[in-house]
């Protein structure tokens, strides 16, 4: 089901479904990128649950990954770009793909949570039509060495884009 492969605009980067064999590379990228990275078990559970799990990849590297759940609305669970590939449009490309998948599965709105401190992600989401609709207090775990949990901004956008 997730073995679909599609060439992106860049000839050396392609979009395809996340495979179990990708999990170590995806977790490595998460660990380099996130304050509280997802574990291999979390990604494995997402695959098992049938979520939309995708990667942008070269022949030997995972450039970006994203996970979307779809019910009555779509919910972006994670989008991550490996630090070596940032500022090249891969996060936008992954997010657009996830939103399109949500729309094709019948969702007419998409939601996500983002840390207020994640300025780059917030700028990307706003540029793609997301607006803040709520806030969750103390949603994110405290950063390593900190005791204060961080709030989450809940953003939403209508589908299709």
Image (spheres, grey):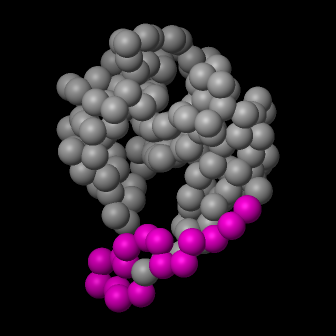
Q: Is residue 107 left or right of residue 117?
A: right
| Residue 139 visible in rendering | yes
Q: Is residue 33 magenta?
A: no
Q: Position of residue 55 (x, y in %)?
A: 42, 29
Q: Is residue 136 magenta?
A: yes
Q: Position of residue 32 (x, y in %)?
A: 33, 55
The quadrant in which the C terminus is found is: top right
Query: In the image, is residue 111 above or below residue 103?
Result: below
Where are the magenta residues, as a range? 132-148
Residue for point 43% across, 19% down: 16
Q: Position of residue 28 (x, y in %)?
A: 26, 46
Q: Position of residue 134 (x, y in %)?
A: 68, 67
| Residue 55 visible in rendering | no
Residue that extends furthest to the front in the rendered view of this protein: 72
Query: In the image, is residue 148 above or below residue 64?
Result: below
Residue for point 76% across, 29% down: 160
Q: Is residue 35 left or right of residue 103?
A: left
Q: Which one is nearer the viewer's eye here, 4 or 138?
A: 138
Residue for point 70% across, 51% down: 156
| Res 136 → quadrant | bottom right
The quadrant in which the N terminus is found is: top left
Residue for point 43% across, 11% down: 4
């Amino acid at each position: 089901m997730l073995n679909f492969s599609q060439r992106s605009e860049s000839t050396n980067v392609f979009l395809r479904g996340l495979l179990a064999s990708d999990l170590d590379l995806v977790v490595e990228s998460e660990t380099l990128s996130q304050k509280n990275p997802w574990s291999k078990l979390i990604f494995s559970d997402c695959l098992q649950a049938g979520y939309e799990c995708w990667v942008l990849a070269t022949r030997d590297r995972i450039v970006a990954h994203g996970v979307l759940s779809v019910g009555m609305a779509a919910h972006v669970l994670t989008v991550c770009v490996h630090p070596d590939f940032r500022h090249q449009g891969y996060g936008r490309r992954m997010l657009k793909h996830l939103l399109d998948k949500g729309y094709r599965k019948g969702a007419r709105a998409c939601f996500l949570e983002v840390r207020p401190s994640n300025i780059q992600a917030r700028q990307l989401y706003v540029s793609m039509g997301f607006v803040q609709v709520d806030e969750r207090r103390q949603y994110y775990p405290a950063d390593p060495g900190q005791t204060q949990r961080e709030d989450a901004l809940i953003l939403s956008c209508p589908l299709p884009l």
